[in-house]
Image: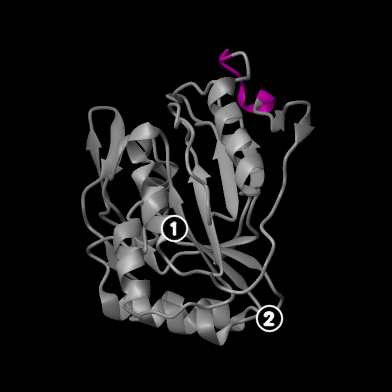
């Protein structure tokens, strides 16, 4: 586990490493480059998870469970918001159900923390929760990523999933999503793409999501413009701001009973 610079969490925990591309939002995934860097630093967990395609780095399809990492949250006494699997996807088809259950047991044993699980594969997540193979826990937030209109179907899968908190990460937002239905969604994170090959974000796309958050009383968190500014001009990393409509939006969901 590591302290995190991600604005909406406190720490990351990666019991799984490696992934495969699921949709257009994965194209410039930071985790692929980070895994390559960690391998070069001699971190065995990330060895052999990526490949070079021209000048780019991408996942090679190997997904690795890390049983030793299951012990890490048990030693953290101070309450934290913990982003689960920032370097992978817990609900990837190659992560065994047995291992997912083991991750769930760790989260059950550490109720002082709030765990934030984000997946691009909400169908499997929903199926496991609704079949009661994994329990609804009051300290576990379940979320999905949506980058454009083609992936908004994931929100419907998430809505069918019993959870204490349901959230959607519209990041990287690389296209309009339209008037998405956020009924039953407690939290929305919006952000542009960063990095040298970042794709642009448009302010009107954010406006659409913000309006739906108002309509459905969904907490709105604006994470970043990314490498592009509100006027869609390329920006330096230093200029990568968080101000939208003249203010910083750090709304968080209200904790309550599962629904």
Spatial separation of the CA atoms under disc 2 and disc 1: 32 Å
235 in the magenta segment: yes
Segment colored magenta = 232-239
Is 182 left, or right, of 254 in this rendering? Answer: left
Nearest the camera: 45 or 78?
Answer: 78
Give percent across and percent down for residue 28. 38, 35
Pointer 2 or 1: first along the chain:
2
Q: Which residue is mark 2?
A: 77
Which mark lies nearer to you, 2 or 1? 1
Instruction: Tell me if I can see residue 35 in this picture.
Output: no
Q: Residue at x 56, y 73 (%)?
A: 258
**SS for callout 2:** loop
Instruction: Tell me if I can see residue 9 in this picture.
Output: yes
Nearest the camera: 239 or 256?
Answer: 256
Q: Which residue is mark 1?
A: 159
138 in the magenta segment: no
- Give above or below for 195 relative to 119: above
Q: Residues within 10 Å of mark 1 (few under 14, many from 20)?
A: many
Give percent across and percent down for residue 106. 49, 82
Give percent across and percent down for residue 202. 54, 20
Give percent across and percent down for residue 200. 48, 21
Nearest the camera: 234 or 210?
Answer: 210
Nearest the camera: 72 or 244?
Answer: 244
Q: Residue at x 37, y 49 (%)?
A: 154
Instruction: Label the magenta part by its dominant secondary structure.
Output: loop
Tag count in the figure?
Answer: 2
- Give above or below for 222 relative to 105: above
Q: Residues within 10 Å of mark 2 (few under 14, many from 20)?
A: few
Q: Residue at x 58, y 65 (%)?
A: 82
């Amino acid at each position: 586990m590591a302290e995190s610079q991600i604005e909406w969490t406190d720490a990351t925990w990666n019991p799984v490493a490696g992934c495969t591309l699921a949709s257009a939002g994965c194209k410039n995934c930071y985790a692929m480059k980070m895994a390559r860097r960690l391998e070069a630093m001699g971190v065995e967990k990330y060895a052999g998870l990526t490949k070079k395609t021209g000048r780019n780095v991408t996942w090679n399809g190997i997904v690795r469970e890390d049983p030793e990492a299951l012990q890490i949250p048990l030693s953290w006494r101070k309450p934290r918001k913990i982003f689960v699997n920032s370097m992978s996807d817990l609900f990837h088809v190659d992560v065994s159900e047995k291992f997912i259950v083991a991750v769930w047991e760790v989260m059950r044993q550490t109720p002082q923390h709030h765990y934030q699980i984000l997946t691009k594969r909400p169908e499997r997540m929903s199926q496991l929760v609704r079949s009661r193979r994994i329990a609804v826990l009051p300290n576990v937030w379940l979320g999905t990523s949506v980058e454009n209109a083609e992936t908004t179907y994931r929100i419907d899968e998430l809505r069918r999933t019993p959870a204490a908190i349901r959230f959607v990460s519209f990041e990287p937002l690389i296209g309009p999503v339209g008037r998405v239905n956020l009924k039953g969604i407690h939290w929305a994170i919006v952000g542009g793409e960063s990095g040298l090959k970042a794709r642009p974000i448009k302010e009107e796309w954010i406006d659409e999501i913000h309006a739906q958050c108002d309509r459905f009383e969904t907490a709105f968190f604006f994470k970043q413009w990314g490498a592009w500014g509100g006027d869609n001009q390329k920006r330096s990393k230093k200029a990568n701001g968080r101000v939208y409509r003249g203010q910083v939006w750090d709304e968080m969901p209200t904790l309550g009973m599962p629904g």
